[in-house]
Image (cartoon, rainbow, N blue to C red):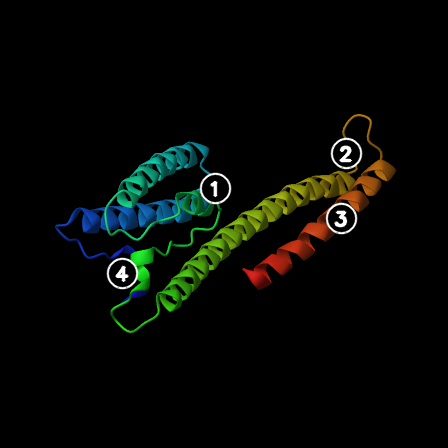
Amino acid sequence: MDVKQWASSGNATASPVGGLQLSIETLSVSICQKKHYLYRQNDRNKRRQKITQKIAQEKKRLVAEIQRYNQQPNADPVDTNLVVQQLSNKAEEIMIWPWQEQNTDGVSIFTKKKLFDQVMLVSRLTEERQILVKEMIQHCQYLKDSIAKVQSLMATVSVWTQTGSYPNGFTEDGSKGLMCLLKKKTAGPQTETADCSMHV
């Protein structure tokens, strides 16, 4: 069974216990997915707020469903406090419920969970890399724009020197000094831009 399918799968039954189990699993996976999506929305405060509110609502529903489940006869008790504690963690690891430990496909539930967590980790690392690359590209563009502005000013100062026509208050020595400072100012950004081009 595919890892992601396993994370969101469940066998619906007509019994109250089976229905509650499915409801608990569904809410748990939904919270897990929203926490994962919340990580991707770190630059959108309004969107993050909506997702956070939705997670809080689903947590309350999940706790209520667990309490209902624990009241059912022949139900495997679920530690509500432990669930609340795990839900408070930033990591979006999926829960393992007592009834899931009785696997029917020969694969340990812990093996499935470990594999699922690795899939989520790879997904997060991939997204983080995309964010870093985007930031690097933006930084490179900023450096290029800064260099272009300084070079434009250098060209203007060069014209002053060649024509001997200086703005009010400027002298030849002042223009040469300004040109020297501008050259130094472009040295650092040019090096950084070259490094960016190599790594992006």
The amino acid pointed to by label 4 is Gln
Q: Position of residue 43 (x, y in %)?
A: 48, 39
- In this view, the residue farthest toward the bottom is 106
Up-down relation of residue 7 to residue 180 (above or below): below
The residue that label 1 is drawn on is: 42
The residue that label 4 is drawn on is: 5
- In this view, the residue farthest toward the front is 73
User: Which circle's residue, 2 or 3, is located before the other in the chain?
Assistant: 2
Say which of marks 1 and 3 sits in front. 1
The amino acid pointed to by label 1 is Asn
Residue 164: name its quadrant: top right
Please name whichever residue, 108 or 167, is drawn nearer the observer in this view of the structure. Answer: 108
Q: Is residue 131 left or right of residue 52?
A: right
Q: Position of residue 84 (x, y in %)?
A: 43, 42
Q: CA distance from mark 4 to mark 3?
A: 59 Å
Say which of marks 4 and 3 sits in front. 4
The residue that label 2 is drawn on is: 165
